[in-house]
């Protein structure tokens, strides 16, 4: 595939990559300004000229991937027989500038339960560059006319009607953030149990009151989950100082908390916080 198809491939699989672009050519060079290639952890697509130039770019791109870099970086190559090289000489005689742009995958957010709060939350999140999964065991909640105000934004919206929503949870990519707010507390509990059986999720939030969480926590412990594992679930969710219990208000608080977490992914938590959304 070419570099453009490769970008789409990386996005669809949730994998990071680096876009390398020839930005400047002075003298003779194997490719013209504007030539591009994509570098992934396990593959490359297209070419910016081969030889030492390309091999060095690939090595540096993979170092950026390993470091989780987000800022672009420029490199300059002298294609001369006198230039120091690591992967073989290129004697074209020119000078080439290359821009390396790390491409981080879009955050993945899954909302389980598209009721009053879930729908309002989906409306907000659909305005952001996310991979947004909406899951509900009730088919009518996912009808296209019902979600017309959700599917037209920058987010890529994935709709999942499933009578067994925990199966959808099991298929989410690593790093996905899960928000549980179904119409049924029994369904919520099953989803919490399924979420705790995965160690690679980016975070799990459960809508509800402190009383609901106290009951769920005891039941999850009784299911055999360790305390440290159970405390990976955050409940209540939202902003405690945001007044009102209207669905839109609660959704704003949950979205704000989520965006704060997405902006600081390295932060760790020591169990559930007292962030009550006032919903049982």
Image: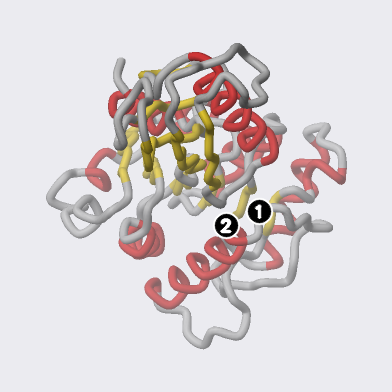
Identify the residue at horizontal 83%, vertical 58% (top origin). Answer: 270
Residue picked out by circle 2: 262
Residue at image point 37% right, 38% down: 26
Left or right: residue 27 compared with residue 181: left
Residue 210: image quadrant is bottom right
Graded by Cα atoms within 10 Å as few (under 14), some (14 to 19) or many (20 or more), the crowding at tag 1 reads few
Q: Secondary structure at mark 2?
A: helix
Q: Secondary structure at mark 1?
A: loop
Percent coordinates x, y for residue 152 in the rendering: 19, 53
Q: Residue furthest left?
A: 145
Q: Position of residue 199 (x, y in %)?
A: 72, 33
Question: Is residue 40 visible from the viewing direction of this image?
Answer: no
In this view, the residue in front, 169 or 174, is: 174
On-image quarter of the C terminus: bottom right
- Where is residue 244? Give x, y as percent: 47, 85
Q: CA distance from mark 1 to mark 2?
A: 5 Å
Q: Which mark is residue 265?
A: 1
Residue pictured at 65% horizontal, 60% vertical: 264
Q: Is residue 233 above or below residue 13?
A: below
């Amino acid at each position: 595939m070419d570099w453009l198809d490769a970008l789409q491939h990386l996005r669809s699989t949730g994998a990071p990559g680096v876009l390398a672009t020839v930005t400047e050519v002075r003298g003779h060079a194997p490719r013209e300004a504007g030539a591009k290639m994509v570098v992934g952890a396990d593959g490359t697509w297209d070419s910016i000229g081969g030889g030492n130039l390309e091999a060095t770019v690939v090595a540096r791109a993979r170092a950026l991937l390993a470091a989780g870099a987000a800022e672009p970086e420029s490199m300059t190559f002298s294609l001369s027989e006198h230039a120091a090289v690591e992967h073989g000489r290129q004697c074209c005689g020119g000078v080439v500038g290359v821009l390396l742009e790390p491409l981080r995958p879009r955050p993945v957010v899954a909302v389980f339960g598209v009721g009053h709060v879930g729908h309002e939350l989906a409306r907000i999140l659909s305005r952001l560059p996310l991979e947004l999964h909406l899951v509900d065991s009730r088919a009518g909640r996912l009808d296209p006319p019902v979600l017309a105000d959700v599917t037209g934004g920058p987010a890529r919206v994935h709709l999942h009607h499933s009578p067994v929503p925990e199966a959808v949870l099991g298929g989410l990519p690593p790093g996905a953030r899960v928000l549980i707010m179904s119409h049924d507390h029994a369904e919520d509990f099953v989803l919490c149990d399924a979420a705790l059986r995965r160690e690679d999720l980016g975070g799990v939030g459960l809508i509800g009151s402190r009383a609901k969480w106290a009951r769920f926590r005891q039941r999850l412990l009784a299911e055999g989950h360790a305390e440290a594992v159970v405390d990976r679930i955050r409940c209540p969710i939202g902003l405690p100082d945001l007044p009102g219990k209207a669905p839109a208000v609660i959704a704003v608080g949950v979205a704000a908390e989520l965006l704060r977490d997405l902006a600081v992914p390295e932060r760790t938590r020591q169990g559930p916080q007292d962030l009550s959304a006032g919903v049982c």
